[in-house]
Amino acid sequence: MAKGKTHGKTLKPRNSNMDLKQSLSSEDWSRPSTFGNELQQNSSLSNQPFAAFSSEQQQKWNDPSILDYSMRTDTSFPKFTQASENSQLLTGNASTQTKVTNQQEGQMNQMLDDGRIQDWDPKAMLNNLSFLEQKIHQLQELVHMIVGQRGQVPGCQSGLVSQQQQLITADLTSIIVQLISTAGSLLPSVKHSLFATNPSAAQLNGVLFTSAPAANTGMMSQNSGVQVQQCVADVKSLEQSNQMDPTGDPGTELYCSAMEEDHEMKDDDDGKEEEHLPPGSYEILQLEKEEILAPHTHFCTICGKGFKRDANLRMHMRGHGDEYKTPAALAKPNKESSSEQVLLKRYSCPFVGCKRNKEHKKFQPLKTILCVKNHYKRTHCDKSYICSRCHTKKFSVIADLKTHEKHCGRDKWLCSCGTTFSRKDKLFGHIALFQGHTPAIPMEDNKGTSGTSSNPAENSEATNKAANVEFSFGSNAADGNGIQSLIDVKGNVEDPYFSLLNYDCSLSGLQDFSQASFDDSSSSFSFLISGEKNGMQSIPNDID
Amino acid sequence: MNRMEMLNEELIFTILDYLHEDEDPLALKSFSLTCKSFCTLESRHRRSAKLLCPDLLAAVLRRYNRLSHLDLSLCPRVDDALLTTLTLSSFLSSLRSLKLTRCRFVTRLGMADLRPNLVELDLSNATELTDSAASAISRAKNLRKLWLVRCKLVSDMAIGCIAVGCSELRSISLKWCLRVTDLGVGLLALKCTQLRYLDLSYVPITEKCLNSVLQLAYLEDLILVGCLGIDDDGLASLKESCGTMRTLDLSNCQNISHIGLSNMTRGAGYLHQLTLSYGAAVGTHLYPAFFNLCFSCFLKLTVTVDVVKCLQNFSMLQCLKLDGCDVTSSALKMIGNWCGSLRELSLIKCSGVTDEGISAIAKRHTGLRKLGITCCRKITSFAIDCVTRSCTSLTCLKMEACSLVSKEAFSLIGHRCQFLEELDVTDDDLDDQGLKYISRCSRLFSLKLGICLNITDEGLIHVGMHCSRLKELDLYRAMRVTDVGISAVAQGCGILESINMAYCDKITDASLISLSKCGKLKALEMRGCPRITSVGLAAIAAGCRQLAILDIKKCHKIDNSGMIPLPQYSQNLKQINLSYCSVTDVGLLALASISRLQNMTILHLCGLSPNGLAAALLACGGLKKVKLHTSFKALLHPSLLEHMESRGCVFQWRDKPFQPQATPCAGGGFVQKRTSNVIEQV
């Protein structure tokens, strides 16, 4: 039941822009029309969710549901629930569901986008709803029919079954899409009304959301953890909310130190070619630290084995039964089968104050999950991999170490002045710049050299020295920065509950929620935490 | 003698200046052998020396202490020790130019000893020259000219050193330096601002370095043959190029079209010569004042009206080479209408060359000196008529394989082209009558009559009577020629230097005996003349002391007795092809005593044993290249091969099957080889 229900809801954008959340009020939530505005609260925001999270972690990994789940107010949309029930009955195929999810997500994004532009029209909404009702009824009948058939003919042909499945899935998809689009049309009006009317919403909101997970632990066990926050990035709203933020944002204090670190950040997470996406043209996802650092991102729902790639998981799933061997189950869930435009996905670093964190004033999103992982490891984690050649360079991403080791000590392009270059063109640029400098050629036949040659031994010694100096300098700098960042982090973790939790820096992004908010668990909202796996899966297949 | 002593040193030096070594290598030798004072004079006069044997270097340096040019390219082995002697020689302070072509054994050690006052250095074909060795060149601060052709191991690093060290460089050739890239060339252009001549043929460069190259203020010649890395897109970004450029060669640059060309030559107002052979399509936008335009070897070049339109601007263009291009008739007409005056036009292997085109060109460019229309198969006598009528000062006409040109055309050539010096009518429809008219061009020094099956002795007699300046005669497969014709030529053309009688199978010893009167004969090719025997060869050896190149392949009757006189008289012999002859170990050993011998081809010699071959190889110290049948590779001792290679000899192993000839003596070689193979297996 829960499975089906959540299935539909998954697709919803969780407008988890913190500030937006803060500014939402409980009253808004109580209205059915806020359907599309449900905001996802991160479980790690509070003590309680965290406790729940950790206690149920194992369970979560084993959780058979691969779907995205999100919070649902059961009462507000009975029809939808009905639809979900149907879907639950019919969809046994996890992968197709995921596919649908992805599709829907894309479509939904589109809808959302559109919705923001339009103003809400209650008439249109009513039309939509009645249309949906019809569709759901049709589907229901169909399913009934299938159930009846199965009862009569037990040995039903698998081909027919799969056909039926596909038919139903398609229907469901369209229903869900429309539902979301309907809901999505409400989004802008809600937002605006909120901002306009309720400046103290943040507090309330925090209360609501943080308490929710505790109330819904049962649900969480099914729905495997919140790890992905989706939000529609709208810089306008961001700024608005920033202004409205009554409690000073600790993130802004962090800001400076993070900026320093940013200089260190390397290519792929830094995004050499900075995208200049207009704010709002993409959707921001934010992973949690645990998720980022988890060795595996895909888990078998049956035996709990972890995988780095979803394709490997699908291969593994074949061992669990024939139903996982269908072409549909083995197919790569394609993210955008529909021709409709899909909102781009960009990622935010969970480290508050980091330039890659969505709250940063000059926020620059990360392109893929891999970027997030590398960025986070490089910038906010210890550099635990040490080069075995030079013993000075340290890396937090093992691939970086391997790249470095490939070049460490070798392929040094030397200038006669003793300067070394990692690249030949750099050396030639240097030589072009300075009068009298020449390339220094490695002396492969030193033995025979007469005295006339310009002391190759000394030369090479000098260059080696230079290289060492360079190296040690580099590493010092790196160390220094590392320490600095550590300190910074510690400085930020003054908030009592952080020390309690023993969670480090990565959580600092959540500080702006006051302690009080966690204590208040009174909320009429059920809170859904999206599964970690699902979070991963719903993300376009960057990793594959 | 006494009178000579009255002359002062300067006057004698002036006289000696006229004794060119190229014309008579023995002249100076005999002068210096006259008496001691002459010997001293000669050694003080000599400025250049070309060494054949490296062992003599020390002696040469002792004797000639005013040498400024030293050529060691003929020495089979130039190594570090040799260069050290060169450096240590206290006499040799005046050395300016050093040629070390093909020195495969020079390392960093030897190069480090190079004199810093060198001005010219040729290290071409030093294929094993490493970066560290080449970087030592940079110590020659005054170097003006550096040739590094086919130095395949030399990379950007060495070029960078040279660029920084030799900032006075005027000319540099990096042809086939496959490891040199944009970086090296870019640095070179940046540091050697005096560069005039830059050859970057077949260097894997792209347009990246061309910007700095074209900014060279004095660049005159830029050779970019086969630079496939350069294309239009890259050239589009080029800035204005240097205005001093006179020659640009873009042959085989298949990725450059007229667009790229126009970008490259923008501002090159004084361009004299442009070569674009075998390249991509060349279009409109060429810029003015090219003197020489060579489009040769542009692979798929279509010379259209567009292309020629751009030529309009090159009013000073003198040389146009469009070899291998696709030329349209209208384009040729455009060339004809063009205001400049061409002196040299090459349309070799151009398709689409028609009579109308040629006649249009001929009418306009009356000053044409050289015309190449080889393989322009549509050409008829009409074109020749126009050319000969208008271009009376034609000195060189290459019209090989113009099969539609009728016999009458040759009479026109003979009548009208009095200044003709070179004529190539290979594979044309030439007969004795035509040859008679051609022989009226008394200035001819090169005449190629290959595959002219209709010419006989009668025609050659006319040649012999009138063309007394003839130096080069090609009778390749002119099968009707006999001894009579050859004798007439030999008699009339006393200064004949090179004659090719290959496959003229009617030739006998009588021809050779008459040719032996041509004392200047340097190259004699008579492969496939089965009637020639050792007697004829002996006569040649005795008469032609300057003989350097001899090809007697498939002259089956030549045996050891023909070989023995060769070392006795023809000490200048450098290259010999003995394949299919009846020469055995003895003859080969006799040959081996020719100290200048460098190049031998010894395939399918019937009576040759491995031991005899080994002995001959060991005895012949100056050998640089030996072509042998593969079967000998196993029969010769590996240490012998090693020894030979360390002496600087390269072996080329050939596995051609034996081509049996009508003459019966052929089979023996194989039988013997087979038996020796068996022996070895046992």
Image: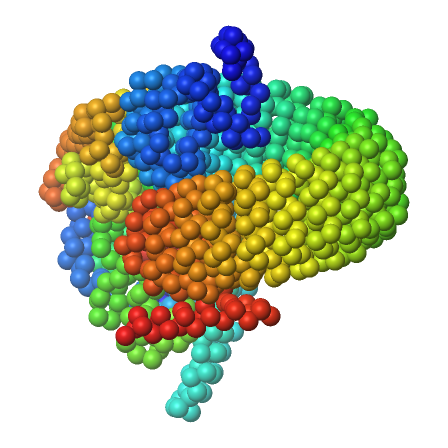
- Tell me: residue B277, above or below residue A5: above
Q: Looking at the picture, tell me which residue is in the foreground, B120 or B495.
A: B495
- Tell me: residue B678, above or below residue A501: below
Q: Is residue B440 toward the left or the right of residue A152 in the image?
A: right
Where residue A405 appears, as percent x and y from the top left, is 23, 43
Q: Quadrant of the C terminus of chain B?
A: bottom left
Where residue A495 appears, as percent x and y from the top left, is 16, 35
Q: Looking at the picture, tell me which residue is in the foreground, A13 or B19.
A: B19
Residue at image coords 71%, 31%: B319
Where residue B400 appears, as percent x and y from the top left, is 73, 48
The answer to whether residue A422 shows anywhere in this view is no
Residue A256 falls in image quadrant = top left
Q: Looking at the picture, tell me which residue is in the foreground, A355 or A394.
A: A394
Q: Looking at the picture, tell me which residue is in the foreground, B459 or B302.
A: B459
How many callouts does the rendering have? 0
Residue A151 falls in image quadrant = bottom left
Q: Is residue B155 toward the left or the right of residue A451 in the image?
A: right
- Tell me: residue B41, above or below residue A331: above
The answer to whether residue A388 shows anywhere in this view is yes
Residue at image coords 72%, 44%: B489
Q: Is residue A377 toward the left or the right of residue A97 in the image?
A: left
